[in-house]
Structure formats: C-alpha cells, structure tokens
Image (cartoon, helix red, strand yellow):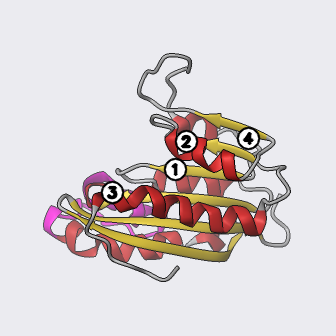
C-alpha cells in the first residue's frame, strides 16, 4: 500500500476499507478490539468493517444529529484520560490534529489510529495549532495566510511524527493520497505504542 494518487471520488471507500483492513488483520484479528469511531457519519465504513472483522465493542459518535445516537464532539471523549480504546478512527475532511494531540496525550497501550484530512484542514487555525504542537511560536504576530498554505503539508508530516515528545512511538504507518477537485486528501493508518516509562 504505497502512496497512490486516485482522481476518482468513488475509489475512496474501498481504499479506506483496504487501509483499515490491513491494520485490523495484522493487529486485531482476535476480535477483542474496542473501536471508537470519532466521525461516524452514516456509519457505512465501520458497518462494512465489522462484517469482516468482529470487534468486542464499537462506539460511533458524530457532531451531526442522527436518530439513535447522541450528538457529541468526539474530542471530549478523547480528552478523558480514562478512555480505553484499541482502535480510534478520525475520518474527517477537516483537520484531525486536535484529535491526534488528545490521543497522543492519553495513550497508555498499543493502539491503532486512522486519520483523514484534506486541504481545507491545512490552513488557518489548524496550521497555527500544528506550529504550537511542534514548539514553534511567532511572537508579536500571527503567521500570514499565504505562508500557512505553503508550509501546511510539511507541518503535517512533522506533526504526525512528533510522537516522542508525548512518550509514544510509531510502530508502523501507511497512507494513500487522493487528489480531488476540492484538493488533496490524505488517509493515514498508524500503529502507536507508549515508550518505556509512560504512565
């Protein structure tokens, strides 16, 4: 599953399944995974995955109201240091980095995560957040919009790999890239684990 560019919108669902299936088969084939779907949407993705890979528990949430579920900001769940999931899926076309920060801050055991983000999530406040995550602070003025766009993708890679400052290491990572008419979308799967001494 090397990096690929797919211009066809319809290919995304199957490739999302393929990315998740790789990690589920490798790390969660025993059916004991507790899954948190942070951006459930219509639930189609994990409905399909659970037909292939049984899980011990599945909890899907979304900010958008839907019959049969509570509307909730999934970051509030991930901010709870007692949350205990084996798989966390953040499939948003905005920025997943505030979710990612909370996952890294509270990670206590080997965990598989999935992140989705596109060009719309790589500007403005997201770019500023990533800079702060990396310890880069502009004193006296904000980073100008034209520079945000130019450095956003570089910041994305740096922020994804900044796990050691949280006492977490990346065991394995895979991604695919789709170029859509709205801009580039990146889909990433990561296997994370705490390094020695993290509580």
Q: For this rendering, which residue is in front, 195 or 10?
A: 10
| Residue for badge 2 | 38
Task: Tell me the SS state at disc 1.
Answer: strand
Give me the disc on residue 90: 1
Marks 1/3: CA–CA distance: 20 Å
Disc nearer the start of the sequence (1/4) = 4
Mark 1–mark 4 distance (CA, rounded to whole Å): 15 Å
Q: Quadrant of residue 117?
A: bottom left
Q: Is residue 186 magenta?
A: no
The total of numbered circles placed on residues is: 4
Question: In this rendering, would 38 be left or right of 178?
Answer: right
Q: Quadrant of the C terminus?
A: bottom right
For residue 83, the mark is: 4
Tell me: 100 left or right of 85.
left
How many angstroms separate mark 1 from mark 2 (CA)?
5 Å
- Which residue occupies the foreground of this view, 75 or 5? 5
Q: CA distance from mark 3 to mark 4?
A: 34 Å
Q: Are marks 3 and 4 in contact (CB under 8 Å)?
A: no
Residue 146: x %, y % from top left: 14, 68
Of the residues under marks 2 and 3, which one precedes in the sequence?
3
Tag in front: 4 or 2? 2
How crowded is the residue under tag 2: few (<14 C-alpha within 10 Å), some, or many (20+)?
many
Q: Position of residue 66 (x, y in %)?
A: 46, 21
The reply to whether discs 1 and 2 touch (Cβ–Cβ < 8 Å) is yes
The reply to whether discs 2 and 3 touch (Cβ–Cβ < 8 Å) is no
Earlier in the chain: of badge 4 and badge 2, it is 2
Mark earlier in primary sequence (1, 3): 3
Q: Is residue 167 above or below residue 66?
A: below
> Which stretch is magenta?
123-146
Q: Is residue 33 left or right of residue 165?
A: right
């Amino acid at each position: 599953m090397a990096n690929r560019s797919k211009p066809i919108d319809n290919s995304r669902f199957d490739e999302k399944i393929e990315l998740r299936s790789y990690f589920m088969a490798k790390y969660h084939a025993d059916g004991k995974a507790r899954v948190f779907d942070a951006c459930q949407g219509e639930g189609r993705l994990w409905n399909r995955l659970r037909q292939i890979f049984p899980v011990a528990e599945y909890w899907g949430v979304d900010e958008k109201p839907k019959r049969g579920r509570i509307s909730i900001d999934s970051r509030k769940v991930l901010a709870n240091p007692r949350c205990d999931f084996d798989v966390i899926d953040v499939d948003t076309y905005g920025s997943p980095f505030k979710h990612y920060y909370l996952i890294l801050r509270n990670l206590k055991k080997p965990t598989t995560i999935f992140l989705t983000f596109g060009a719309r999530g790589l500007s403005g406040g997201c770019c500023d957040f990533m800079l702060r995550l990396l310890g880069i602070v502009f004193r006296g003025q904000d980073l100008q919009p034209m520079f945000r766009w130019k450095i956003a993708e570089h910041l994305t890679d740096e922020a994804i790999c900044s796990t050691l400052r949280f006492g977490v290491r990346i065991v394995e990572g895979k991604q695919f890239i789709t170029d859509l008419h709205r801009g580039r979308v990146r889909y990433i799967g990561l296997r994370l684990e705490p390094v020695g001494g993290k509580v």
